[in-house]
Image (spheres, rainbow, N blue to C red):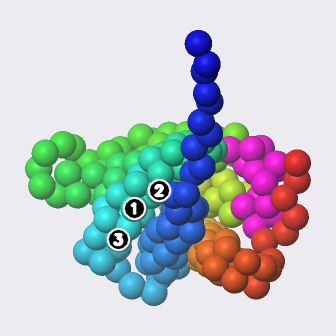
Amino acid sequence: MDQTTIALKDTSANPGPLGLLAFGMTTVLLNLHNAGFFELNSMILGMGIFYGGLAQVIAGILEAKKNNTFGLTAFTSYGFFWLSLVGLIVFPKLGWIDKTSNPGMIAYLVMWGIFTLLLFFGTLRLSKALQFVFASLTILFFLLAIGDATGNAAIKQFTGFEGIICGGSAIYTGVAVLLNEVYGKTVLPIGPVVR
C-alpha cells in the first residue's frame, strides 16, 4: 500500500504585530494616567477589555496555529492580564466583589513581574527589540508593586513614565515587524534574532 505524505504550508498571517500593538497602545494609555496626565477613565478600561484584552487573546490563539508557543503564552497571558485588571477595577464598583486590598494588589503585580522576568529569558533567543519590551515590562510590574507598597506618589509617577517607554517599545516592535514583513526588508530594525 502506497502512503503519500502531504505537507501543508501555513499561509496564515503573522499575529505578532496585532498582539504587540494591542499591548503597547493599552500600556501607554494606562501609564499616561499613572504619570498624572489624566484620570483613570472609561477610555482606559475600554482599551483594557477590547484591545489590550481580547485582541491579545486572539493574537495568542493565532500564534498557536503558527506553532509559536512563546507567542501563544505571552499574548494570551497578557490579554487575560488586561481583562483581569479591568475586572479588579470594575467589579467592586458594580458591587459584585470587595475591592482588592493593597497587599493583594501588590501580590498580583509581583506575580506578573516574576512571570514577565521568566518570559524575558525566552526573549534572549529572539530579537533585541523584544528583549527591551520584556525587560522594561518586568521593571514596570515591580515598580508598580513598590509604588503600591510605599504609597510614594513620586515612585508612582516615575513608574508611569517608565510604562510609557515600555508600551512605546512594544508599539515600535509591532510596527517594525509589520512594516518589515510588508516591504520584505528591514524598514525599522529590531535587532538580530539569536539562534
Residue 113 visible to an observer of this rendering? no
Asked which quadrant contains residue 178, the reply is: bottom right
Residue 181 visible to an observer of this rendering? yes
* Extreme residue toward the left, this view: 95
Question: Which residue was labeled with disc 2?
Answer: 59
Asked which quadrant contains residue 86, the reply is: bottom left
Q: Is label 3 or label 2 in front? A: 2
Q: Mark 3 Cα within 10 Å, few/some/many (few <14, many 20+)?
A: many
Mark pair 3, 2: CA separation: 15 Å
Q: Mark 2 Cα within 10 Å, few/some/many (few <14, many 20+)?
A: many
Mark pair 1, 3: CA separation: 10 Å
In the image, is residue 175 part of the stretch drawn in magenta? no
Of marks 1 and 3, which one's residue comes earlier in the chain? 3
* Extreme residue toward the top, this view: 1
Question: Which residue was labeled with disc 3?
Answer: 47
| Nearer the observer, 160 or 187 | 187
* Left or right of 56, for residue 117: right
Question: Which residue was labeled with disc 1?
Answer: 55
Question: Which mark, residue 10?
Answer: none
Residue drawn where x is 79% and y is 61% of the image: 127
Q: How many marks?
A: 3
Chain part drawn in magenta? 119-131
Q: Position of residue 187 (x, y in %)?
A: 76, 85
| Nearer the observer, 182 or 50 | 182
Residue drawn where x is 75% and y is 44% of the image: 122
Q: Position of residue 151 (x, y in %)?
A: 51, 60
Label pair 1/2, CB-CB below 8 angstroms: yes
Q: What SS does tag 3 mark?
A: helix
Amino acid of disc 2: Ala
* Left or right of 45, for residue 130: right
Mark pair 1, 2: CA separation: 6 Å
